[in-house]
Amino acid sequence: MNAALELHLLNDFQHDFPLEPTPFASIAKRLGTGQEEVLQILNGLQQRGTVSRVGAVFRPRSIGASTLAALAVPDEKLDEVAQMVSSYPEVNHNYQREHHFNLWFVAAAANEVALQRTLKKIEERSGCKVLFLPLLEEYHIDLGFDMTGSKRKSATFIDIHSGSLRQPYLPTEQENRLIAAIQSGLPIVERPFEAIGMTLGQSESDVIKGVQDLIRLGVIKRIGVVVRHHELGYRANAMVVWDIPDEEVSQVGLCLGKVEFVTLCYRRPRRLPAWRYNLFCMIHGHDREEVLARVDEMRQACGLQHRVCEVLFSTRRFKQCGARYARAAA
């Protein structure tokens, strides 16, 4: 296996995937190799779990409904409850974290009613009250991972849709069918958009245009190679939560969102008295010491030396996949 070629595929194509009939041929040309080798490497990376999928990442709450949620589960029941939570197709991420609220998951559904129905079932079956923490304002959301140290956020991760949330877009029936077809990833074949079109009864050009329209509308945040951080060597990840005065949270959030190693930064509601924090960041590192050092850097960068925060390290990953907002046609 060509290690240099594998690195380029993992690093260089997490964004700006070619939206054209033969995208993998275009990628191969840029890398000075053949299409068959690109397809073989990407299929191998997906089989090994290094790549989650090649495809679209949808912007949270741009369509449907989604939320971060947490449970405080007795230790002796954690494995059982985690398995139950992961069994719901609406749940796309599910992690154990070091905290009284020890099980954290992300759920997405076609609408708020369906989302709340799922959360209610989880609450009833677990016997634990769900801490419901929907996104209120985003400052930076991009789980792309630079593996070379050469990329800079200012050039690569500019996001014209950041800020206060708009009303979710209501997809047409045709758009819903397209979303259902691509939400688990593109087929890694010579003409992926043609293959999708065949399942939908649409032309290849209509599928490409449909994807372009969803990007333009801000529904698709990026399209490209979606990697799994743990398999890339980022074995320590932490959700850092801050208690920031409400009148300052947007300013602080924008500051933290510009810090180079912050992959996610957003505002969520407090849930007093159980939960006092209103600003959330995700950071990843190769070990705990690196993550903790980065927390100190965040404090220095944004003047947060005297602000209360907690660092919730992730200890187990129970589920990680793309969000599912639409059901495939029967």
Image (tube, rainbow, N blue to C red):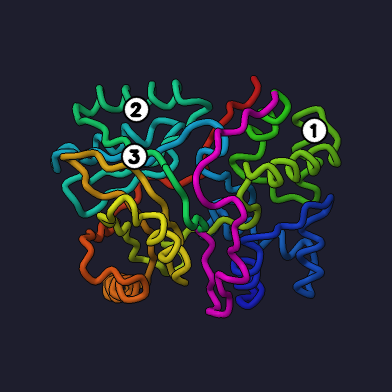
Q: How many labels does the image show?
A: 3
Please state which of residues 119 and 9 is positioned toward the viewer in this rendering.
Answer: 119
Q: Give the range drawn in magenta.
A: 143-172
Q: Which residue is drawn at 32% across and 76% down?
A: 300
* Separation of marks 3 and 1 at Cα, in angstroms: 39 Å
Q: How crowded is mark 3: few (under 14 residues within 10 Å), some or many (20 or more)?
A: some
Residue 124 rendering spot, x and y as whole percentages = 25, 22
Residue 151 rendering spot, x and y as whole percentages = 58, 75
**Side of 218 where 84 appears, left or right:** left
Badge 2 or badge 3: first in the primary sequence? 2
Say which amino acid is labelled 2: Leu
Residue 150 among those drawn in magenta: yes
Residue under label 3: 133
Q: Which residue is drawn at 75% across and 37% down?
A: 196
Residue under label 1: 198
Q: Quadrant of the N terminus?
A: bottom right
Residue under label 2: 119
